[in-house]
Amino acid sequence: MIEKMKKGKIAMTITIGIACFALVTVMMMQFKVVNETDITAIEDMQESELKTELANWKTRYEEIDAQYQETTQRIEEYKNDEASNNEASRLVQEELEQTNTLLGLTDVHGEGIVITLKSGSDAAAISADDLLIIVNALKFAGAEAISINDERIINTTDIVDILDGSFIKVNGQRILEPYVIKVIGNQSHLESSVTGNGGKVEELQTLGHTATIEKDNDITIGKYNGEIETKYIE
Amino acid sequence: MIFIAILIGCILGAILGLNAPMISYTYSSYLAIAIIAALDSVFGGIASVIKKNFDLKIFISGFFGNAILAILLTILGQKLNVDIYLAAIVVFVWRMFMNLGTIRRYYVEKWSEIIKKKASEKSKNRKEEETAKVEEK
């Protein structure tokens, strides 16, 4: 009888021990969860408060989303602008190149003629006026680029006699014989403008100077080497 | 003896519980109500030990049955949008106080009995001494 009671008591003790063990295990787990989760803020709120909060967040989200859309659109616009700017700058660049070509600020090449002049020994030396007349005639014949002894003829070019015809200056640079005039343009037009009746080259030849005209399909004329300065143009 | 078992159980449980993996916050409300139910069962068990009517089957079935029933009620309450778990907590806590009262009364009575015994022994001794004195005279 006593043994039976003892057995019962041991079983009882163990059972309660196990129950306590299970209980405390679960309690500790729960404590950990509660500690880790910041529930107080959420739990203290009423449902209506939570609803307002949610609505607030939704509105903010929508606002920010709208802002985002706007910004994206603006970026798109800027991108388009940039593209058109590129286009514009490309056009400007093209125009600039063309202008430079026309002004004589670039090296150019093309078909044309080369006139070589050398004063004869028994006649007066070739003067700047002769060169001027030739250049003028060539321009009339549609010359696109002219150079005398590699001095490019541009709109400010001067061709003058210095010291009573002892030498000639082109673009302020002294040039010496033989004078080599390179011209780009229609070959037959250019040639006919300086030869034939009234042609200056032929006239020089008859005066006893040496003058030759060569046709060339690829003449290279260098650019103007000086600087174009304007003081009075406003 | 029973207190040693409780103490060992608590210590082992704390060690295991602190090392156990985290459970989702979603289930923590069910776990909480189960804890209250289990706590009530344990106090009930201790009280019944003191009352000397402890039954292993009743204890075990109560321990698990109450916990499961409390969890189910909580789930039902959530589905119905009624806080049934409040009723469960009220009942469990009330019963916990009742059981605690039983335990406390038992120990207080035990203690006061001991004091009474001592007092009566003292008075007995004194009486004996007095009679001895009287006899001496």
Image: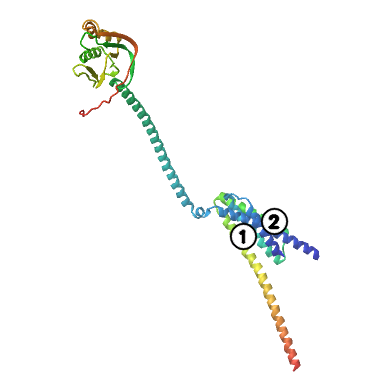
Work out how far the residue at label 2 is from the one at label 1, CA to CA, in angstroms. 16 Å
What amino acid type should be assigned to the residue bearing mark 1? Phe
What amino acid type should be assigned to the residue bearing mark 2? Ser
Can I make out residue B44 in this image?
A: yes
From the viewer's perspective, tell me whether residue A101 is left or right of residue A9: left
Label 2 belongs to which residue? B61
Position in image of residue A19 (x %, y %) = 68, 58
A127, A159: nearer the viewer:
A127
Which secondary structure, mark 1?
helix
Which chain is mark 2 on? B
Marker disc for residue B92: 1
On the image, which quarter does residue A30 sit in?
bottom right
Position in image of residue B135 (x %, y %) = 76, 92
A31, B109: nearer the viewer:
A31
In this rendering, the count of numbered labels is: 2
**Quick one: label 2 or label 1, which is nearer the N terminus?**
2
**From the image, which quarter does the N terminus of chain B lie in?**
bottom right
